[in-house]
Amino acid sequence: MRSMNTVLLAAALGFTVGAVGCSKSETKPTTETAAPEQPKTPLEMARDKASAYEALPANFDSETNPWSLEKETLGRMLYYETRLSMAKDISCNSCHQLDKFGVDGEPTSPGFNHQRGSRNSPTVYNAAGHLAQFWDGRAPDVEEQAKGPVLNPVEMAMPAAPEVVARLKAIPGYVEAFAKAFPGEEDAVTYDNMAKAIGVFERRLTTPSRWDQFLGGKDDALTAEEIQGFVTFAEVGCMSCHNGALIGGNSYQKLGAVKAWPDLADNGREDATKNAEDKHFFKVPSLRNIAKTGPYFHDGKVAKLDEAITMMARHQLGVELEPAQVASIVTWLEALTGEVPAEYVAKPELPADAPAAPTEPTEPTEPTEPTEPTE
């Protein structure tokens, strides 16, 4: 009976009677070890890190300011229009030159009467994808940003929006272009519509690069040196702030987060928000085309890219980079240089001024006797 019970118990547990008495050799732990894991190649490491990034979209079109060809055409003209400035000598393109990756290469840009502001003019390419505009983020989008420089006394120096509108309405070609861009509006020539047209044009200023091909799965879009440069960039910690489709442009960070930034007089975002907690915070710049858009930082005081990288690592991450690491990162950053859309940004023919009104001929007057000089 006991034997039968043993059989039934063993069956219930999924064993045979013989299995209950299995030998010691069958239960001894194996002495074999797994093969050591092979280290990842730079390409494999780059692929892992690149999963945090997205490719650049074709445009940054807005639902609240939808694209139309007429608005784009008008915006392109207004972007190059110097008559939007007090002295009729400065346009958007003066400081954000579209044939030079959207910058003028100056630490700060010359404005009305050769005045200069305190901040560097950042590139307009891909800017419509940023979380906000200006170094301190005081404008929520490119439409709002377009209104600022026109009325800034140090930049284009127009006294007020009505004076800008009056100039535009005095140019027949613009009256016609605004009517086409904003059909159905009784008074299409407005300051807001000027900004909307410029914004529509700027929202398609994108510069895809070989980096986007790499993100799309093309392994040979980057050289081995460029791939290693990205791995170095990621391992150092740079991607904690420089991420997303624009490799930056989507957050604010304190300049000198780990080590105080030298000679930092600009209060940064605090000037816009009036919040003391925002002191020395600036918008993180996009790294797209960074090799072409120096000088660097909010004040344009750093001319060379390798110096900018060294300073960022030191003051933001508390890391002292070796020269070889800096050179490797520069190599990858150069691969972020995209193509300037030459046809899209070509300067258009601008509307002519209205013809001068004919003057009535005046009757000749008799010459007057010279007067005696007074003391």
Image: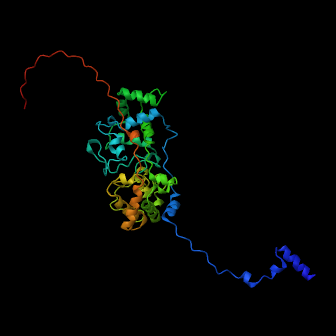
Name above or below for residue 154 compared with residue 72: below
Name above or below for residue 258 compared with residue 105: below
User: Residue 234 location in percent, x, y?
Assistant: 47, 62
- The quadrant in which residue 363 appears is top left
Query: Residue most toward the front?
Result: 220
Name above or below for residue 270 compared with residue 93: below
Front residue of 311/209: it is 209
User: Residue 214 location in percent, x, y?
Assistant: 49, 54
Residue 314 in sight in this render: no
Which quadrant of the rendered structure holds the N terminus?
A: bottom right
Label tally:
0
Query: Residue most toward the top?
Result: 363
Front residue of 86/63: it is 63
Name above or below for residue 366 compared with residue 304: above
In the image, taking residue 352 as reference, residue 131 lies left or right, namely right
Front residue of 299/138: it is 299
Residue 7 in sight in this render: yes
- Residue under the point 40% across and 37% down: 76
Query: Residue most toward the bottom?
Result: 24
Query: Residue most toward the right?
Result: 1
- The quadrant in which residue 93 appears is top left
- Residue under the point 39% across and 53% down: 290
Which quadrant of the rendered structure holds the C terminus?
A: top left
User: Residue 226 location in percent, x, y?
Assistant: 43, 59
User: Residue 183 location in percent, x, y?
Assistant: 48, 28
In the image, taking residue 360 as reference, residue 177 lies left or right, namely right
Front residue of 159/136: it is 136
- The quadrant in which residue 349 appears is top left
**Colour setting:** rainbow
